[in-house]
Image: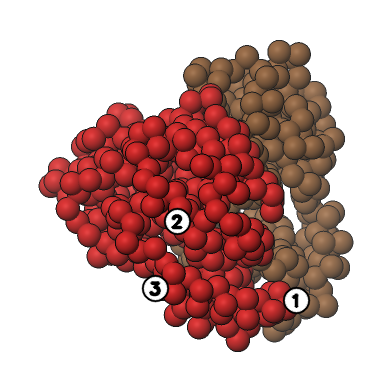
Chain colours: A red, B brown
Amino acid sequence: MAVYTSVSDTELNAFLDYYDAGDALSFKGIAEGVENSNYLLHTTKATYILTLYEKRVSKSDLPFFLGLMVHLASRGLNCPVPIAGKDGALTHNLNGRPAALISFLDGVSITKPDVDHCRQLGGALAEFHIASVGFDLKRPNQLGQKDWQPLFEKCRARADEVEPGLAALIDHELAKLDAIWPSYLPRGIIHADLFPDNVFFLGPDFSGIIDLYFACEDVLAYDLAICLNAWCFDGKTFDKTRARALVSGYSQVRPFSELELDALPLLCRGAALRFLLTRLHDWLFHPDGALVEPKDPLEFLERLKFHASVTGPSDYGLE
Amino acid sequence: MAVYTSVSDTELNAFLDYYDAGDALSFKGIAEGVENSNYLLHTTKATYILTLYEKRVSKSDLPFFLGLMVHLASRGLNCPVPIAGKDGALTHNLNGRPAALISFLDGVSITKPDVDHCRQLGGALAEFHIASVGFDLKRPNQLGQKDWQPLFEKCRARADEVEPGLAALIDHELAKLDAIWPSYLPRGIIHADLFPDNVFFLGPDFSGIIDLYFACEDVLAYDLAICLNAWCFDGKTFDKTRARALVSGYSQVRPFSELELDALPLLCRGAALRFLLTRLHDWLFHPDGALVEPKDPLEFLERLKFHASVTGPSDYGLE
């Protein structure tokens, strides 16, 4: 949850002057996103999300993120879209920070996804990958495979506080993955954080994707590997049926090569390590009294161990 | 801000089955209220606030709070109203806690109230006092004058950590106010927490009152004294013009006796002490990592000193 910056009625009205978006009817800080301050705004014209970008999001990345939303929406993907101001700009100053007015997306996140949710998610992810083709801004993955080692350097000395032996295990995984990481696979723009809280459904039907603030260029199948980690475990237990549905939903929209399929266990192992590392970092270094409760890194240690133990795609229920 | 209890889509849908309120279109935790978990819910029928009552609100008080909202709304006051379920009940179980579905009120809180806001607030407070007449449930003020001494007992040993000499000053104030507290004044149901964040405006116009979870029976003019503390200071500086507007707005709706006017400095002094004490308590005893940032108690120490120094209503700009 996150509302870091408070916005007064006067500041809100000054911000709304940049837009032709009506007058404020209600304005409430919401517990959504962990990187930014988010407000739900009803005006005489529509409902919006007002996002105020805090320091964890680099200002220079905003044209990529906001431009990507516009691009994806223009290709028919249901994602939030920033509204242009009267001057055509997508961000304007609010309390000394850049802020955007973003279209409101109906939908509810699913806490315990079932097989049908996973099938629809797979299709939506493939559509995301296809729709992003042709978007011409670049953003490298700042949490990609090459970034894991330096991230771990900040944590190594204290890693065993969280679990004895953790530092050695991570060292082993980092070396192993660095030697065999399949960076030759098809690349494109990936969401990179498509956890269930970033996907909306209306009743049983997929309705949209939110929170594109980790989107970047990377291996497409790695995005699927993130989803397999995020959607197909119950605690430490992997659910093959959901995994099969997820991959099958994906490949019905974007054909999935044998090379990509074969690399999936490795990509899953890397994805589990990536979330283990970022959660470990946040666990060790979150400031006292932070509004965001750090998530348990060990959840992803279990998942990492599972992926490291598999012999091939068949262990995921895939052929 | 407060979202203490997370609610899954499945739990939400089970809760909505108690109501005839449509299907969920979106559901977001909001940063509103400090006692409860609040969600903003859009359904196919309307927009609601879903409030989940955490342990700080006593279950046995819910019929009073929810019944009062229904009563006030039926008398034309614009406040949130709990929606009855298909079974007629105003609360239903959600994650093991009582929860209510409450009508959504348009409006935006004012951070820096001006004279006109204060005049309208005064009128609205008087309407609140008049509209609550005839509501037949009772709830004593649990933070009334008689409760200040026991509350301070929990804090005395550590009060000087916050400000040297604070314990002695509060002891003096407690004794003084206990000797001369004007409990003979007209009583009724008061809001008891009508700070600017609990009052909505639409553009320049008053639109409604929220957060009735401190409402109780007490001296009516004490409610006005709380508002004078909450709306008429800029830091430690008292604004007579706003105070005059507030009291005049009030007395145009509910005539204000000379007895009440004369007691106002004392009531203001008590109100400042009440908020000093509760803030002091929360400051000293808030748990590490609490979602709610404790508010600075010393703000009300300054206000208390101001009220203790006045010689009569004329120091407030009142005659």
The amino acid type of the residue labelled 2 equals Ala
Q: Residues within 10 Å of mark 3 (few under 14, many from 20)?
A: some
In 3D space, how far apart are the residues under numbered discs 2 and 1 (Cα atoms)? 63 Å
Q: Which mark is residue B159?
A: 1
Residue identified by numbered label 2:
A263
Q: Between B127 and B309, which is closer to the camera in this rendering?
A: B127
Q: Is residue A145 left or right of residue B23?
A: left
The quadrant where residue A22 appears: top left
The amino acid type of the residue labelled 3 equals Lys
Q: Is residue B195 left or right of residue A104?
A: right
Task: Name the element at disc 1.
Answer: helix
The single residue placed furthest to the left in the displayed view is A87
In 3D space, how far apart are the residues under numbered discs 2 and 3 (Cα atoms)? 17 Å
- The answer to whether residue A245 is above or below residue A184 is above
**On the same chain: label 2 and label 3?**
yes
Q: Is residue A197 visible?
A: no
Could you tell me residue A274's position as x and y percent?
Answer: 50, 65
Residue drawn at (73%, 33%) of the image = B94
Marked residue chain, label 2: A
Residue identified by numbered label 3:
A146
Marked residue chain, label 1: B
The quadrant where residue B209 appears: top right
Q: Residues within 10 Å of mark 2 (few under 14, many from 20)?
A: many
Residue drawn at (61%, 22%) of the image = B73
Q: Which of the two marks, 2 or 1, is nearer to us in this view?
A: 2
**On the same chain: label 3 and label 1?**
no
Q: Which of the two marks, 2 or 3, is nearer to us in this view?
A: 2
Q: Residues within 10 Å of mark 1 (few under 14, many from 20)?
A: many
The amino acid type of the residue labelled 1 equals Ala
Task: Name the element at disc 3.
Answer: helix
Q: Between A239 and A312, which is closer to the camera in this rendering?
A: A312
